[in-house]
């Protein structure tokens, strides 16, 4: 099976802090990581490959340093990677990102399965996966928590998380699924695997090499436009009372406070 | 592309200070953008010399006049409307009135015509109904086909979808098919002086907010987070023009097959992502058999019961109950954290999304207190039962 995994390098959100004076994000020194949901996707792809054979191809669009994220996935066990890296790709919204990635995925036909992470933790949109599926004209099953490939490798059966529980959904391959937490436990690559990953093929692709409709790439290809970015008022700790001696009294104070706020 | 006019740039460094991404640097006393630039435009507005510009594509807005109406895609399951659909009707009403355009609801399903009265009472002027067996359960293909075709023929100005699991499955599929802009998970919507929909959403775990326009495409599409807007007061005398949609689902075009639907949680169990109040517990609960202590509080408040990541990872609670960055997105009015010390991933997942945060923790230095509006330092096993008692007492008085 040929399995393609689109990934994104993201800042470790937990370490992003706000400059109290300028109210902007402090990104200096914030480590970049593989989007955690994408790690579930890579892990699942490798497990399917280990069972059925074939190859796992990682694909990303991003600046030169995104190579670190690619290497991590190769160390986990992906076989090779495409890196879409060029200034014209910059400023892409979800549509332009999905369109661009889909052009690159088309060069990898015939593929059997695309596994994406549910969403990236910096943008949180969950749009790029379904948009890729639509551009490629293949079915999608989002929020996969369990995946079964049929013995003949022609069909996929997915346990999908919904707002009310789960659905078991089946479709023919090729298809695109998105991975959520709980699908698997991503492996930690061994030192040997990290060394070996350096030898694996990473193909860098520019906008010109990619071809396609270049008007759809990057900022000019993006139908949405960010017009303002602002910082919501940061929360500061409010009232704090000691309830160690008199829990009943503390409970009373809290309920009174909630009543006054109109919450209860 | 970000363009910097080097002749105009005075190297004043203001852009380096306003850039939310730290992407502006001064090289040889002139501003330059690094790879971190996302073209958000913060620097363009603040440059005192007007030296920075962004090249964007242009489009003739005169053709946008054909697009009229604010649409809400109703979501129902088994003939029950989801709350978010009604919430969207109140915001939709406001936007439609501002634009002077009708508020329309798109209702897909099977044997759902009974819902039209409710939708009309909640403000819908026009209801497009597609009632067919093949729409009984949500499938990406069938719903995308019908709604995309309807958008192409009816040309709405705005399309709003609830940011539920299925809403976020459907929205991007329609947007990509019609090559439309789509803003995910909005928490704010308004109309600007050019009659454009301003879509505001959190990003970077709620650390920043972004306002987004779709200046080049119509309809303007957004998915909207549940619990952000209040449902309108129903007015039973408000009537809607109910129109039957004549678009048949082609069975061959539906490529996925739902083999089984499994409901989790007890009947009527509140979901953390939908609930107005969420009571959540962390490692302070010590053992799974202690969860009922906190569950009792949730029950008394009619709140959903959630848990922090360690609790879910330990298997003491279900995945769908996890609150925080890698869990479900919540937006309650009240969040009560019991025995959650507040790992940073929990704080970023909660701080930007809950209106009021209450923390109960035995450690006075627990990070959760840095974001709580009201904190009680104390043993949750002693404080929580007292809270339950006190709520019961207040209820009895009412």
Image (cartoon, helix red, strand yellow):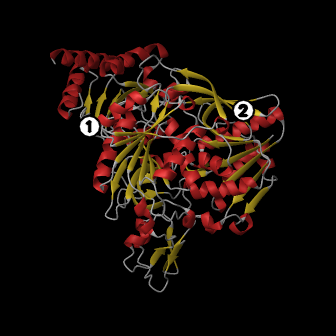
Q: Tell me the subunit letter for badge 2.
A: A
Residue at (81, 40) in percent of width and height: A1
- Which image quadrant: the N terminus of chain B? bottom right
Pick the residue in front: B334 or B130.
B130
Q: Label 2 neighbourhood size at 10 Å, few (<14), some (14-19), many (20+)?
A: many
Whole-number angstrom distance, CA of label 1 to CA of label 2:
47 Å
In the rendered view, tell whether residue B398 sits above or below residue B194: above
SS type, badge 2: strand
- Which image quadrant: the C terminus of chain B? top left
In the rendered image, residue A207, in percent from the top left (x then y), is placed at 68, 66
Q: Is residue A230 at least partly visible in the picture?
A: no
Left or right side of B277 for A226: right
Give the label on residue B238, or none.
1
**Residue beneath disc 2:** A156
Residue at (24, 34) in percent of width and height: B235
The quarter of the picture where residue A209 lies is: bottom right
Q: Which residue lies furthest to the left in this view?
A: B397
In the rendered image, residue B341, in percent from the top left (x then y), is placed at 42, 32
In the rendered view, tell whether residue B358 sits above or below residue B192: above
Closest to the camera, between mark 1 and mark 2, is: 1
SS type, badge 1: loop
Left or right side of B263 for A3: right
Left or right side of B167 for B331: left
């Amino acid at each position: 099976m040929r399995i393609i995994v689109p990934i994104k390098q993201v800042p470790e959100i937990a370490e992003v802090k706000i400059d109290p004076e300028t109210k902007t994000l402090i990104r200096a020194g914030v480590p970049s990581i593989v989007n955690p949901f994408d790690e579930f996707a890579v892990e699942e792809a490798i497990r399917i490959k280990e069972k059925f054979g074939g190859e796992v191809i990682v694909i990303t669009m991003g600046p030169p340093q995104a190579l670190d994220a690619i290497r991590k996935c190769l160390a986990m066990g992906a076989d090779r990677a495409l890196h879409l890296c060029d200034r014209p790709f910059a400023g892409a919204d979800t549509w332009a990102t999905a369109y661009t990635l889909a052009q690159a995925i088309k060069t990898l036909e015939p593929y059997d399965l695309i596994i994406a992470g549910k969403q990236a933790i910096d943008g949180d949109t969950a749009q790029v996966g379904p948009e890729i599926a639509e551009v490629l004209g293949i079915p999608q099953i989002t929020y996969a928590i369990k995946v079964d490939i049929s013995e003949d490798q022609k069909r996929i059966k997915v346990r999908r998380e919904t707002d009310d529980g789960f659905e078991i959904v089946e479709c023919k391959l090729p298809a695109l699924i998105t991975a959520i937490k709980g699908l698997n436990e991503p492996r930690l690559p061994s030192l040997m695997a990290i060394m070996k990953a350096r030898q694996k093929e990473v193909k860098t692709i520019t906008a010109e090499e990619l071809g396609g409709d270049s008007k759809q790439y990057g900022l000019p290809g993006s139908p949405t436009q960010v017009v303002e970015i602002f910082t919501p008022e940061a929360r500061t700790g409010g009232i704090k009372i000691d309830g160690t001696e008199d829990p009943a009294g503390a409970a009373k104070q809290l309920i009174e406070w909630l009543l006054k706020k109109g919450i209860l | 592309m970000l363009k910097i006019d080097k002749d105009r740039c005075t190297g004043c460094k203001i852009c380096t200070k306003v850039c939310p991404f730290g992407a502006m640097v001064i090289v040889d006393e002139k501003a330059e953008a690094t790879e971190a630039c996302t073209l958000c435009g913060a620097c363009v507005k603040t440059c005192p010399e007007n030296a920075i510009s962004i090249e964007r594509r242009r489009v003739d807005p005169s053709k946008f006049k054909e697009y009229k109406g604010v649409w809400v895609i109703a979501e129902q399951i088994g003939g029950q409307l989801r709350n978010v659909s009604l919430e969207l009707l109140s915001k939709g009403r406001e936007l439609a009135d501002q634009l002077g355009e009708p508020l329309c609801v798109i209702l897909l399903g099977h044997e759902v015509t009974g819902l039209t009265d409710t939708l009309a009472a909640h403000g819908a002027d026009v209801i497009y109904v597609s009632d067919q067996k093949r729409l009984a359960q949500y499938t990406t293909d069938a719903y995308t086909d019908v709604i995309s075709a309807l958008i192409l023929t009816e040309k709405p100005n705005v399309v709003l979808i609830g940011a539920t699991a299925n809403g976020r499955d459907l929205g991007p599929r329609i947007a990509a098919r019609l090559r439309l802009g789509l803003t995910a998970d909005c928490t704010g919507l308004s109309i600007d002086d050019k009659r454009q929909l301003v879509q505001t959403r959190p990003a970077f775990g709620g650390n920043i907010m972004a306002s987004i326009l779709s200046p080049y495409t119509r309809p303007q599409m957004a998915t909207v987070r549940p619990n952000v807007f209040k449902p309108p007061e129903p007015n039973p005398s408000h009537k809607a023009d109910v129109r039957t949609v004549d678009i048949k689902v082609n069975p061959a075009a539906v490529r996925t097959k739902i083999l089984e639907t499994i409901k989790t949680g007890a009947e009527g169990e509140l979901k953390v992502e939908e609930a107005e109040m969420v009571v959540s517990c962390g490692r302070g609960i010590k053992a799974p058999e202690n969860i009922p202590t906190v569950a009792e509080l949730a029950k008394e408040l009619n709140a959903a019961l959630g848990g922090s990541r360690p609790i879910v990872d330990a298997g003491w609670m279900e995945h769908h109950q996890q609150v925080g960055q890698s869990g479900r997105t919540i937006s309650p009015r009240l969040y009560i954290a019991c025995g959650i010390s507040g790992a940073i991933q929990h704080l970023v997942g909660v701080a930007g999304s809950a209106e009021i945060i209450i923390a109960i923790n035995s450690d006075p230095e627990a990070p959760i207190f840095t974001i709580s509006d009201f904190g009680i330092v104390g043993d949750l096993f002693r404080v929580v039962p007292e809270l339950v008692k006190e709520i019961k007492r207040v209820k009895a008085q009412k």
